[in-house]
Amino acid sequence: MPSPEPSAGMPPCVLEDMPPPPAGMPLIVDFENVTKTYDAGTPRAFTSITDINFKVEDRPKIGEFVGVLGPSGCGKSTVLRLIAGLAPHFPQTMGKVFVNEQPVQGPGPDRGFVFQDYSNFPNRTVIDNVAFGLECAHVEEKERKAKAMEWIQKVGLDAKRDGLKYPHQLSGGMNQRVAIARTLIMQPKIILMDEPFGALDPTTRQSMQDLLVSLWRELEATVFFVTHDIAEAVYLSDRMYIFSPSPGTIRHQLKITPADRPARQMQAERSFQESVLAVRDILEKLELEKAALAAKGSPK
Amino acid sequence: MPETEIAKTTPSKPSVWSNWLGRARTIRDVPPQLESWMFGLAFMGLALVVWYLVTAEWNGERFMPRYKLPSPGETFASFPSLWFDRALSLSAIASLARVLGGFMLTAAIGIPLGIIAGCYLRVNAFLKPLSVFGRSVPIAALVPLTMIWFGLGEVQKVMFIFIATVAYVLFDTTNAVQAVPDRFLDTGYTLGAHRTRAKGARRATFFALIYALIFSFGLFALDDQSESHGLLRGMAGSSFWLHALFGLTLGFLLWYPIQSHQLLRKVLLPLALPDIINNLRLVFGVAFGYIMLAEVIDAKRGLGFIIIQSQRVGPREHIYLCLIIITLLAYGIDQGIRVLQRKFFPYLKNAES
Ligand SMILES: Nc1ncnc2c1ncn2[C@@H]1O[C@H](COP(=O)(O)OP(=O)(O)OP(=O)(O)O)[C@@H](O)[C@H]1O
Ligand SMILES: [Mg+2]
């Protein structure tokens, strides 16, 4: 049952338009008129995102949680992969992508990525999967194993029991915990998550959300989080970007009360559910727009 | 409900039988291991019975005369003469050594080149004509050609196996590397996999030294005069060091690109390796068949040589024995590799096929 009032002493969940960033603040991610066109100049040319503009300030010691929502195919993954510098989405066709005020050159360990597909290396044990990044950075074996064990424990797995297992011996939720551990162990200042919990059941999902919030606090990183689950986005985000249908561009930038209490508790409050409804309304309008676009585009 | 009652009144035997029949008729029902073996044995028993029947005497006459198809008894009775008079074991070892030699060369060149081609698509495009040509050229035509190029000795047999198989291994390896899903590359990159030139050069040098050893000593051992020359005189010759230098260069060039990038060394190579080994196993079986082609012409020993001798001067029984032995040998090696596969790739749920 939704409780009518927010829990004692906690602010209600509020949705409001994002104010423009104060001038002079350093930016951690900055998109300037970014457009991506595949097969440009051929009859098959296809524009997936167009004229994307946003700025996320660098807030040292705090970080920020950016939820990314939008109809399917609008270019959410494209934006994340442009930040990460991953082909074929990177490089953009037009515009500029800056990370820490530097143009993105390619992928690197300063930007962690958690993918929707289970992408743990099947030939490595859980420990070796989590230690992969440190191994690439030439950290000595003993040190990186110890650190890996520590992170396996942090994401809620049993380092002793699960550490020597292979990914195929783990459940989907456990696999995503390993993926989170192997990303966070590098202590990236930017974490990109593309529907990381998309394949998980609702209960596992909620506990993963809580896990994410607690770990993220500790890392003080800026997180970009793509999801189709509106409640998840409203719960986790400090800021939310809502994309228009393809060719995608950012339609709404919203500011939301941060997740400062457990998912189960906060998601039962009325103000939270009203926010979810408001976002759902926006998305439903966008879906209608998408359908109208498709209807206009098809006859010819 | 009535079904369970019938099962109760007429217990055990018929229900076990109909149960089994039901499972046997189910598409993709997996039989117990023991049952699978029984079916395999049943086929061999059936083949033996047919063999026995078509070669048995009925009123002093047999359906198949002895010079065409000897009976099982006659065939197995000729084993001692095959073993002692024809020195079966020496021939088997000779054939195996030729295949292994050629195959080692194939693996040493085809695998690294295939990995590079699987990663760098321009190299792949460059090598494509080679693999298309190599896989469609008629293998039997290579026998006379390799004789023209390499003479009649052991070098010819090893080179024949190499030329006949390298295109397949190259192609399969390229495919295995390309089949590694992109998400593992993305994961590797975002966790910081990068080029490591100094470390790569060190590791490639290690490989280069092994190649130098293989080429210098291997080619020396294949030389027909090697026994009379002796190793020391061989090492004094300039060709010995030329071969070593060649191996050194080749090994470095082939392995530096692989060892100098963490993504290749830590991600693509280990992920593609089970597939690569599996394909290697399949090609090895084929290569073992090819060697017979090279051995029927002017060999001094080898299983192919025994077969052609038995056809010319008899006894014909030896041909059949050799066929059985070749299959057993090939099967044994295949099983051996599979055991190793399971040991080295414990994460493969189904290291089969
Ligand atoms: N390599 C490619 N070549 C051509 N078009 C592509 C390519 N990759 C993506 N696209 C197109 O770009 C558009 C945006 O893709 P993207 O994966 O970013 O969408 P998304 O918002 O993440 O969708 P979803 O919610 O379904 O994951 C899609 O219409 C897709 O068809
Ligand atoms: Mg996507």
Image: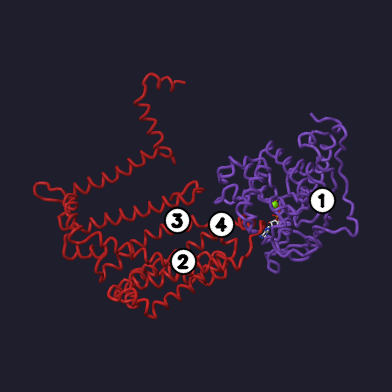
Chain colours: A purple, B red
Q: Between B22 and A34, which is closer to the camera in this rendering?
A: A34
Mark 4 / mark 2, whichever is N-terminal: 2
- Label 2 crowd bin: few (<14), some (14–19), many (20+), radius 10 Å: many
User: Looking at the image, is mark 4 or mark 2 nearer the viewer?
Assistant: 2
At x 63% / y 52%, what residue is drawn? Answer: A144
Which chain's residue wears label 1?
A: A
In the rendered image of this protein, does residue A37 appear above or below residue A2?
below
Q: Residue A218: horizontal and vertical position, in percent?
A: 76, 46
**Residue B95, numbered circle:** none
- Label 1 crowd bin: few (<14), some (14–19), many (20+), radius 10 Å: few
At x 86% / y 36%, what residue is drawn? Answer: A10
**As drawn, is B332 to the left or to the right of B51?**
right
Which chain's residue wears label 2?
A: B
Which chain's residue wears label 3?
A: B
**Mark 1 falls on what kind of element?**
loop
At x 59% / y 44%, what residue is drawn? Answer: A163
Name which residue type carries label 2: Gly
Spatial separation of the CA atoms under disc 4 and disc 1:
39 Å
For disc 2, the marked residue is: B110
Respond whether the residues carrying marks 3 and 2 are from the same subunit: yes
Spatial separation of the CA atoms under disc 2 and disc 1:
52 Å
Spatial separation of the CA atoms under disc 3 and disc 1:
51 Å
Name which residue type carries label 1: Lys
For disc 1, the marked residue is: A61
For disc 3, the marked residue is: B278
Mark 4 / mark 3, whichever is N-terminal: 4
Spatial separation of the CA atoms under disc 3 and disc 2:
14 Å
For disc 4, the marked residue is: B180
**As drawn, is A165 to the left or to the right of A31?**
left
